[in-house]
Amino acid sequence: MEKIIEAPCPPQGADDDEGTELRELTVDAAGHGQRLDRWLAAQLEAFSRTYLQQLIDDGAVQVAGRVVRKSAQRLRVGEPVRVLLRPSEQAMAYVPQAMALPIVFEDEHIAVLDKPVGMVVHPGAGHWSGTLLNGLLAHHAGAAALPRAGIVHRLDKDTSGLMVVAKSAPAYEALVAAIAARRVRRIYVALAHGRWQGGAHQTIEQPIGRDPRQRLRMAVHPGGGAGAKPARTDLRVLDGNTAATLLACRLHTGRTHQIRVHLAWLGHPLVGDLLYGGRLAWGMARQALHAVRLGLPHPVLGRWMVWDSALPADVQQAIEAAGLHYNRALLWPGDDPDQAVE
C-alpha cells in the first residue's frame, strides 16, 4: 500500500529540499525477506533501481522509523517504509538557465551560435547544468516543446565554433533531414602533429565506433562491426612543415569525435588532444579544432546561407607558434561565405 504526502516531512537527517515528495509504503507479504532496493524498485516503477539505491545511500529512506543506508537490508512484512523522493541531476537538467548565448544569426526558425571553448552543449554525466540546452530553454519559450531544445548537432566541450539550433518544429524536422542527407556543410580548421605524408586533398572513409579497450574513446573499426557507423571526412592541407600540418576538414557525417579519431588513425593527432595521442604544444591547452564555417539551406525559407567564424586566439597563436599561416580563402574553393549571408 502506498500513500503520497503532499507536504512532506523528511526522514531524519534529510534536508527539506524544494521539489521533494514523500512516499509512504507498507511491506506486503510478497516483500517479506526481499532486499530493500529490489522491493522499492517494484513498488516505484517510475524510478530506476540505481536512483533508489542512491536515495538509500543518502539517508532518504526509513524502515520501521529508522534511517536505513544499506540497499541489501532485508524487509519484514508489515514494516512501514518512508521514501523521500528528490529530483535527480538528470531530472533537473532540463531547466531554463539564463545565460549569454553567442548568437551570430537568429530568426524565428533558427539560431546560429559561435560556441566558445568550455561550453557543454547537452547535459550529461558531470555536466547536468549550465549547458547550451539550459540556455536555449531560457532564451525562447518554444525550446521546451522541441526535442533537446532544438539541438540538432553537437560540438565537443573543448571544440569551438559554429553550430545551428532549431527554434520551431518545422525547422527542427528540416534540419535533421538536411543533416541526414548531407546537405549541411561543416568545415573545421585543425592543427595536427607531424609532416603531412598524403596528398593535398584526401578523404577518410572509415567507420567509427566505441573503443573496446577504453570506453571513453572512439576508434576506427576498418572492418565495421562492434556498433561502428560509417564516417567520412574530407581533408585539405592549408599549410605545413616538419612539425605540424594545418588542415581544413569537411564533415559528411557527424560521428562522436570524428575528426579527432580519423586524424589520430592517420597518425596525425590534433595538437592538444591528449585523449587521442596529441601533445600539449605551442600554447594549446585543448584540442586545436575550430568549426570555422557552416553552410545550410534555410530550413523554412530554402535560401542557401553560409557563416564564417574567426579563429579563436588560442588556435591562431598556436598556428603562428608552429610556424604556419592560416588563409581563409584557401578553406574550400568556391565556398565563399561573403556571398551568402547579408
Image (cartoon, rainbow, N blue to C red):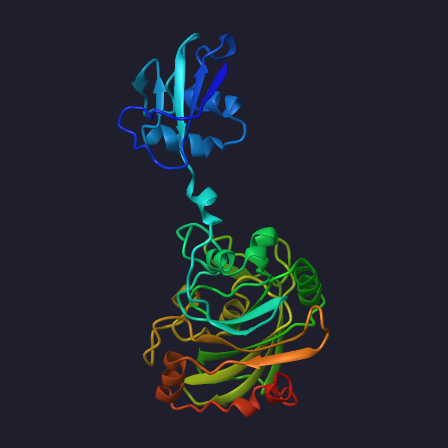
Q: Which quadrant would residue 141 be assigned to in this image?
A: bottom right
* Closer to us: 174 or 233: 174
> Would you say residue 226 is visible in this rendering?
no
Identify the residue shown where x is 46% and y is 67%: 101
Q: Which quadrant would residue 166 be assigned to in this image?
A: bottom right
> Would you say residue 176 is visible in this rendering?
yes
Above or below: residue 85 compared with residue 252: above
Identify the residue shown where x is 61% and y is 80%: 306
Above or below: residue 103 compared with residue 22: below
Q: Position of residue 158 (x, y in %)?
A: 42, 67
* Closer to us: 306 or 189: 306
Identify the residue shown where x is 51% and y is 66%: 155
Q: Which quadrant would residue 143 be assigned to in this image?
A: bottom right
* Closer to us: 257 or 62: 62
**Residue that extends furthest to the left in the rendered view of this protein:** 13
* Closer to us: 20 or 58: 20
Q: Position of residue 254 (x, y in %)?
A: 60, 65
Q: Position of residue 7 (x, y in %)?
A: 40, 26
Q: Position of residue 113 (x, y in %)?
A: 51, 71
Above or below: residue 276 compared with residue 199: above
